[in-house]
Image (spheres, rainbow, N blue to C red):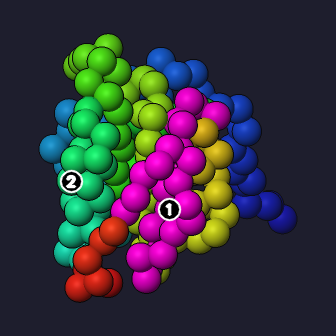
Amino acid sequence: MHADPVIERADVAVSRDDLIRRWNALAANAESPDYSELNQFGELILSPKPTTAHQRVASAIARILTLQHGGEAVTEVSVLTDRGIRIPDVVWMPADRWAACRGQTPLELVPDVCVEVLSPSNTREEIEMKIGAYLRGGAREVIVVGLKGKRDASALGISLSLPPELF
């Protein structure tokens, strides 16, 4: 009698440099999936494509952040964290921080503000993991926008008045 082999993953995170190399190799491969992240072990995490409604909310948030605070807000930027390479729906930084990371893919620093727009497939554990990763990486604020557009008060004075027709 012979047993099936047991395949185990070594629970050792790969180095930051290895994550960046893997990310850039995936980006250069035309056959790589469009909506993915890498966890801290360098494993590919696939996500469903965002809906039009989701993208409209993210774009509205980016416009509001830029209008209220200057700098620049961008959607779907890859960010290196202690939990791998993650892609917040929106990030914001002042112009000098953007200048400091010119040409980086993924960004090797976590932006000042990271926004996650919830989707039906998001789990509480996933969002809590991302919030922690962004904050540990240096984000000053993480905003989570729920499916109904509600959110708590901002530590940085950010006011997101999103049009109700987006929800």
Check if residue 154 falls in the magenta segment. yes
Query: Image height check: is 50 above or below 6?
Result: below
- What residue span does the magenta drawing correspond to? 136-160
The x and y percentages for residue 77 are: 31, 41
Residue shown at 35% from the left, 33% from the top: 93
In the picture, the disc for residue 78 is none
Q: Residues within 10 Å of mark 1 (few under 14, many from 20)?
A: some
- The residue that disc 1 covers is 144
Relative horizontal placement of residue 51, taking residue 16 as reference (left or right): left
Residue shown at 21% from the left, 69% from the top: 56
Relative horizontal placement of residue 85, taking residue 51 as reference (left or right): right
Q: How many marks?
A: 2
Can I make out residue 32 in this image? no
Viewer-nearest residue: 109 or 3: 109
Q: Amino acid at mark 1?
A: Val
Helix, strand or loop at label 1? It is strand
Relative horizontal placement of residue 85, taking residue 62 as reference (left or right): right
The x and y percentages for residue 83 are: 59, 40
Q: Amino acid at mark 2?
A: Arg
In the picture, the disc for residue 63 is 2
Viewer-nearest residue: 49 or 164: 164
Viewer-nearest residue: 37 or 109: 109
Viewer-nearest residue: 21 or 4: 21
Alpha carbons under labels 2 and 1: distance apart: 16 Å
Residue shown at 69% from the left, 50% from the top: 7
Mainly helix, strand or loop, the magenta region? Answer: loop
Q: Quadrant of the C terminus?
A: bottom left
The x and y percentages for residue 28 are: 20, 33
Asked which quadrant contains residue 35, the reply is: bottom left
Can I make out residue 160 in this image? yes
The x and y percentages for residue 102 are: 24, 18
